[in-house]
């Protein structure tokens, strides 16, 4: 079987972590031909990062789209959304990257462009939407829904029947009790405990979590 050629869009911290993720996947089952990073930061192009070359910007990927797919390793949901939309307009293949250590039910549903890092637990009948990123040791409860472009930071707990709205950001160590709705484009601060629904376009922090700031509405 021929290997899938893949590049990692984003050469920052998350991108370097995704590179390790692919190496770990290959250690279990050799499936990926990892070509390098893609980054629009001109000063990085042509350099080597963690023994992997920055091949160029998004234009490089678009020019090579017939041979190569990608994973978009950008942490900020809105920035990621803009990049993905450009790639989708150019029919770029978008792969999932799911660490071999992830504990997951066979009844988990994944979208495309999903990143799930080491130590994550995905309970039964969860729905992980397109371009969601779930970081180390987070737990996603049964029947939870993570809508597209969500980012979940390390050691977060999302409970049963929670809904995390699109482009929302769940901070490290945050806990969301069961049957909670987090609105779209909202941020839950690190260590927060969410016991009530959170509206769209806000920042909520504390124990219990309270809205402290309104954000600009996402497009």
Image (spheres, rainbow, N blue to C red):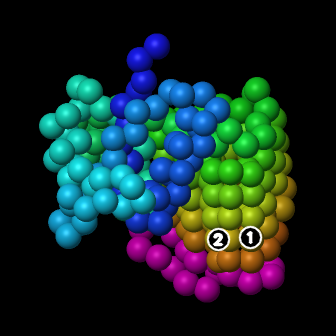
Report the residue at 75% width, 27% height from top: 107
Whether residue 121 is visible, yes or no, is: yes
Mark 2 touching mark 1, by CB under 8 A?
A: yes
On whether residue 210 falls in the magenta region, the answer is yes
Q: How packed is label 1: few (under 14 Cα within 10 Å), some, or many (20 or more)?
A: many
| Residue sitting at x 68%, y 58% | 136
The CA distance from mark 2 to mark 1 is: 6 Å
- The residue tagged 1 is 174
Q: Is residue 217 shown left or right of residue 143?
A: left
- Name the quarter where the C terminus is drawn: bottom left
Instruction: Measuring from the top left, give residue 34's x and y in whole percent.
Output: 40, 39
The quadrant holding residue 12 is: bottom left
- Dot 1: element: loop
Look at the image and tell me whether residue 179 can be seen: no
| Left or right, residue 217 beside residue 181 | left
Tell me where residue 32 appears, x and y as whole percent: 46, 32
At 63% from the left and 64% from the top, the residue drawn is 153
Disc 2 marks which residue? 171
Range shown magenta = 201-218
Residue 24 inside the magenta-drawn segment: no
**Eyeballing the image, is 187 above or below 38?**
below
Q: Position of residue 137 (x, y in %)?
A: 75, 57
Compared with 167, 194 (above or below) is: below
Q: Position of residue 39 (x, y in %)?
A: 28, 58
């Amino acid at each position: 079987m021929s290997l899938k050629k893949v590049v990692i869009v984003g050469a920052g911290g998350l991108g370097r972590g995704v590179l390790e993720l692919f190496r770990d996947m290959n250690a279990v089952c050799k499936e990926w031909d990892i070509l390098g990073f893609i980054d629009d930061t001109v000063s990085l192009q042509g350099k080597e990062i963690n023994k992997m070359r920055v091949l160029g910007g998004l234009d490089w990927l678009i020019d090579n789209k017939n041979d190569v797919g990608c994973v978009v390793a950008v942490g900020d949901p809105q920035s990621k959304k803009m990049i993905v939309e450009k790639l989708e307009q150019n029919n770029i293949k978008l792969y999932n990257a799911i660490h071999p250590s992830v504990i997951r039910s066979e009844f988990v549903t994944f979208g495309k462009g999903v990143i799930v890092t080491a130590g994550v637990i995905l309970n039964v009948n969860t729905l992980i939407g397109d371009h969601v990123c779930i970081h180390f040791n987070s737990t996603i409860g049964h029947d939870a829904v993570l809508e597209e472009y969500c980012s979940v930071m390390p050691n977060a707990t999302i409970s049963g029947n929670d809904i995390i709205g699109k482009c929302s950001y769940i901070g490290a160590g945050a806990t969301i009790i069961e049957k909670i709705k987090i609105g779209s484009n909202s941020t839950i601060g690190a260590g927060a405990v969410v016991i009530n629904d959170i509206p769209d376009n806000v920042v909520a922090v504390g124990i219990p979590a309270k809205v402290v700031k309104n954000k600009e509405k996402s497009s």
